Image (cartoon, grey):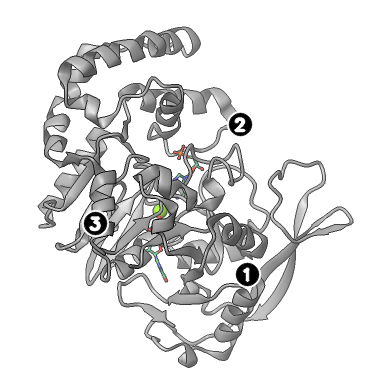
Amino acid sequence: MSNKIVVGAQWGDEGKGKITDMLAETADLVVRYGGGNNAGHTVIVGEEKFELHLIPSGILYEDKKSVLGGGVVIDPEAMVEEMEGLEERGISLANLYISETAHVIMPYHRMLDALEEERKGDSKIGTTGKGIGPCYTDKTARRGIRIADLLDEGRLRAKLEKALDYHNVLLEKVYNAEPLKAEEIIKAYQPYIEKLRPYVTNTSLLLNEAHKNNQKIFFEGAQGTLLDIDYGTYPFVTSSNPTAGGVCTGTGMGPTTIDDVIGVTKAYLTRVGAGPFPTELENEQGEYLRDKGHEFGVTTGRPRRCGWLDIPILKHAVRVNGLTEIALTKIDVLTGLDEIKVCTAYKHGEEIVEEFPPYLESEIPYEPVYENWHGWEEDITEIRDFEKLPENAKKYIKRIEELIGIPAKIISVGPGRKQAIIR
Ligand code: GDP
Ligand code: IMO
Ligand code: MG
């Protein structure tokens, strides 16, 4: 038995799709446990590029089961579009399973996401606009609509009418928007419901049976530790728990079934959307990382903000996820830089702070304290043996391991499935 979680250790887009795809070769099931189509996971297989938003990266292997757990929020239209896109490319969906208890993103969720961002103006979060926050809000407010509700038209109509009793007041009175009609939503969603119907099942049962039969399960995180509603840079976060704890609630698997937690981390740092970012580079070095790392959002196309690696953030990720190892990605992007910086602590007034502060709002800024490292010139994208890396790259990686206290067992040196050093 070896069930593993692949979790983002930073602000998302760390390369979770690539690492999951690479490791999925040895798994029997690949499972998404949270988030929705706010995620964008890139997987490159040979010459082909796949951008997955909701469907686990394991779908690219015909013999693996791909599961969307109950913690995921599903926009039926986006889901069907993704399914059809894969089918058109010859990818089989025969092994796809969708939880009955996953919550459904409704048109009013997408509207409210956009309207609320507009209302916030300068203090907006910079969400992906996919309706994620409003959908999770309805879930906790106990007026959400779940996948199983879609399958019974009478129940769907009753729940939708109830939800609209609330949402139409909000739309009309708070946001000055047009109200919605249950009948129209049902009509629009009907073709999606029929497409999803055969895939819906009790995924907690499916997963626990697989586990009992000694099958290997990989949990594919979406977003990242610092976007977690509890452990991220609140309120500039998403509305779910992308951290490892989210696996249990998001799949119906108990904590004793999980063996390893792999934290995926870039060799530098990026963030999309608003919120604090102490090591952000708003200069040509930041541009360099963005250009060379192709740092543009998969879901929204927005340029990602770029900065140096932040060790207090990684130590926080090690702790709150119980990481057993890291997968260090995009180290090839650093090739060609004369100098590479690593933030090891923050200066907060006269104080040196070594742990990531749970509350960054402060009149006194948290200024990064940097260590400077020499870069390297050699192309490392074809290296598969750690010892063959340039000395300065090895020093950089060893120093990161020393600072965070866990090993980098996977070092990714390019976007392709085979471009990695496994130690
Ligand atoms: P995810 O959301 O965590 O799955 O990451 P994204 O797919 O949003 O962003 C990661 C980007 O980096 C994608 O374009 C990947 O193809 C690419 N990528 C992943 N690992 C590496 C790597 O080691 N080197 C380079 N150059 N690109 C990588
Ligand atoms: P993957 O899985 C990067 C960010 C948004 C915004 C905040 C809230 O590809 O790593 P939301 O739409 O979730 O309410 O937006 O969270 N965000 C991501 N940033 N990668 C992601 O997913 C993200 N999913 C959400 O940019 O700042
Ligand atoms: Mg992404």
Q: Position of residue 103 (x, y in %)?
A: 33, 32
The answer to whether residue 18 shows anywhere in this view is yes
| Amino acid type shown at disc 3 | Ala
Residue 281 visible somewhere in the drawing: no
Per the model, the C-alpha gap separating discs 2 and 3 is: 48 Å
Q: Name the residue under label 1.
A: 404
Closer to the camera, 248 or 41?
A: 248
Between discs 1 and 3, the one toward the N terminus: 3
Q: Is residue 360 above or below residue 262?
A: above
Q: Quarter holding the N terminus?
A: bottom left
Q: Quadrant of the C terminus?
A: bottom left
Q: Which residue is denoted by mark 3 in the rendering? A: 210
Mark 1 and mark 2 in contact? Answer it, CB < 8 Å.
no
Label 2 secondary element: helix
Residue at image x 32%, y 69%?
A: 23
Which mark sits nearer the N-terminus, 1 or 2?
2
Rendered location of residue 48, percent (x, y): 22, 65
- The residue pinned by badge 2 equals 122
Q: 417 or 402: which is nearer to us?
A: 402
Res. 11 mark: none
What amino acid is found at the position of numbered circle 2 in the picture? Asp
Q: Does the residue at mark 2 contact the one at mark 3 (Cβ under 8 Å)? A: no
Is 352 left, or right, of 152 in this rendering? Answer: right
| Residue at mark 1 to residue at mark 2: CA–CA distance | 35 Å
Residue at the (67%, 61%) spot, across then down: 312
Query: Within the image, what quadrant is residue 73 found in?
Result: top left
Number of numbered discs present? Answer: 3
Task: Indicate the secondary structure of the residue bearing disc 3.
Answer: helix
Q: Which residue is drawn at 30% across and 72% down?
A: 417
Q: Residue at x 17, y 15 (%)?
A: 154
Measure how far apart labels 1 and 3 are at the Cα level. Answer: 34 Å
